[in-house]
Amino acid sequence: MAGFRRKKDDQTDTPKKKITKQDLKKSMRLFKYVKPYSGTFAIGFVFLLLSSVTSMVFPYLTGQLVDSANAEMLKEINTIALALLGVFAANAVFSYFRIYLFAIVTQKTLADLRQSTYNHLIKLPMNFFSERRVGELNSRIASDISLLQETLTTTIAELIRQVLTIIIGIALLSYISVKLTLLMLCLVPVVIVIAIIFGKHIKKLSKEAQSKVADSNTIVEETLQGITTVKAFANEFFENMRYSEKTNEIVGISLKGAKWRGAFASFIIFALFGSIVGVIWYGVILVNQNGLSVGDLFTFILYSVFVGASMGGIADLYSQLQKAIGATENLMEILDETPEEISDVQLTSINRVNGNVSFENVSFAYPSRSDIQVLKSMSFSANSGEQIAIVGPSGAGKSTITNLLLRFYNPNAGTISIDGKAIQDFPLSELRSQMSIVPQDVLLFGGTIKENIGYGKIGATDEEIIAAAKQANAHLFVEGFPEKYETIVGERGIQLSGGQRQRIAIARAILKNPSILILDEATSALDSESEKLVQEALETLMKGRTSIVIAHRLSTIRKANKILVLNEGKLVESGTHEELSNVENGIYQNLSNLQLEV
């Protein structure tokens, strides 16, 4: 089962990254998406400064309120109380506009970033996708951008607030009492540093526990998905043992984490309150020496709490910033990839090709395994309207020919041309818009039948879609559904049978009306009845078009104008069905005899 081979790098969590000057420079590229909204950001920043300043006024006025308990200042108590309410009101207004304005900038920036990343992603060449997992790329669009949302909305603003609080707070503390400030600066940072060390270790244990929980969930998921296999091999006890071992590991790690959390709580209670007692103790001594008023002492304690909380909060904000820089770097890696030159083309009779295809001494190896030559000096031609079949054992290079024809990859050597013109000289979108492929494993989108057929020609009318479905032998079964063409096909077309999916794909290809048609083992996975209906639809589709047919069942290609037999990347035989059937000990003859025996 896959669970035995699951690796840590399968996880798509964005790691924290050490912040360097180079990383900051890369991350600054993100701000080009913020630039269009710089005016709104600047106003939000002003409100951030105002809310920070008004927050720092609160301890001062509170101290004044305490001092007003003296008979001499009692008459000022109402004024101070009203001033405090005014500060709270102003802070509330400033905070509202700060949050709202930053949200405007964040949401619009992220929308632009999402659109830019997705638009760039789908234009990247096939070799990019062949080297990366879908889950990883999906994480870049989802998780990383969501992480940036938190950073732009909260983290940056809070980091600025905390830094301002620390700077202004220490300045005001020094103004109230230099002696008390020195004592506070000796005690609080020590407590914070030890708290951060505790926090990191607890977080590490928590993450390890989460990883074990994920592993245990994977065992459950795999077991239930493969329950037939589990029961067939009578491995219920083995699976139970696997799950028990993993859950016992969770218990061990969780209890270890509980010990650290308990020690941390005990330390905080003792150290934090001990620090406060120490500051108050020394403050009271200063009050008795007439070096400080009671109100000043109260103000000092409040400022100490503000500064201490800000110092403690910066560690977590810095951690979030590290993750955000890692996420930005992941996105920039995608945006730095060179895309294909894609354009929105509208075919006309002027740029439509006839479909004369030629391969001349084409050699190719996939970038991911460049040491293995998949095609070796391949040469053949197909005239307009001809049906060319390609057969051969697995790994012979059949599907590679279609990948090169569609320019998913470029050949390492040789020339591929259409109507005498090298395919590299065609605009890429124009080239692909004149071809259509019906694969063995048809992928339908999760929408309606109408939307899936209409994908062959964006903006097609209902009449065009129905006409294509009729030619593909699909109209009858579609009309049998209660919702007809509005029937939802489900994820990957799971609501339809294999034969129905194939006919939807054929209807889509018919609607596109290509000059060159590629059929990649389009009937190999179907039962006899479905194959007959699909084959009839394919014959309709191939009329008047150059057709490249990769076939597994040789009975489906007997009428082909030419059959190409590949073996180990080389063209070893070529001819019609009758010609190749008479080649003594030929690969085609052996394949044909083998299928007849089966």
Image (cartoon, helix red, strand yellow):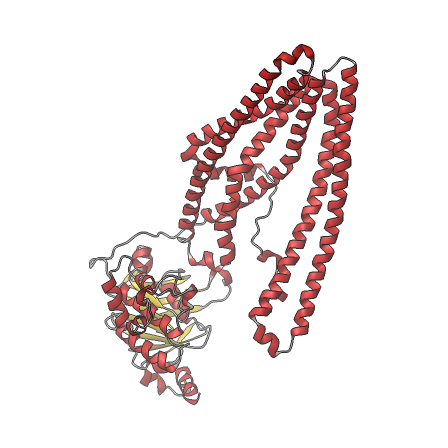
The residue furthest bottom is 597
Residue 11 quadrant: bottom right
Q: Position of residue 426 (x, y in %)?
A: 30, 56
Q: Using the image as rendered, state which of residue 453 and residue 75 is in the foreground.
A: 75
Is residue 503 among what the camera can see? yes
Q: Using the image as rendered, state which of residue 339 and residue 114 is in the foreground.
A: 114
Residue 564, compared with residue 107, is above or below; it is below
Residue 306, compared with residue 472, is above or below; it is above
The residue furthest top is 72
Where's the C terminus, which quadrant? bottom left
Q: Using the image as rendered, state which of residue 99 and residue 211 is in the foreground.
A: 99
Where's the N terminus, which quadrant? bottom right
Q: Position of residue 30 (x, y in %)?
A: 47, 39
- Residue at horizontal 42%, vertical 83%? 591
Is residue 382 among what the camera can see? no
- Residue at horizontal 34%, vertical 68%? 505
* In this rendering, position of residue 362 left or right of residue 344: right
The residue furthest left is 349
Q: Position of residue 121 (x, y in %)?
A: 43, 52
Residue 27, compared with residue 74, is above or below; it is below
Q: Position of residue 383 (x, y in %)?
A: 26, 71
Residue 580 quadrant: bottom left
* In this rendering, position of residue 290 left or right of residue 559: right
Q: Using the image as rendered, state which of residue 136 and residue 415 is in the foreground.
A: 136
- Residue at horizontal 72%, vertical 50%? 257
Residue 189, compared with residue 466, is above or below; it is above
Numbered disc total: 0
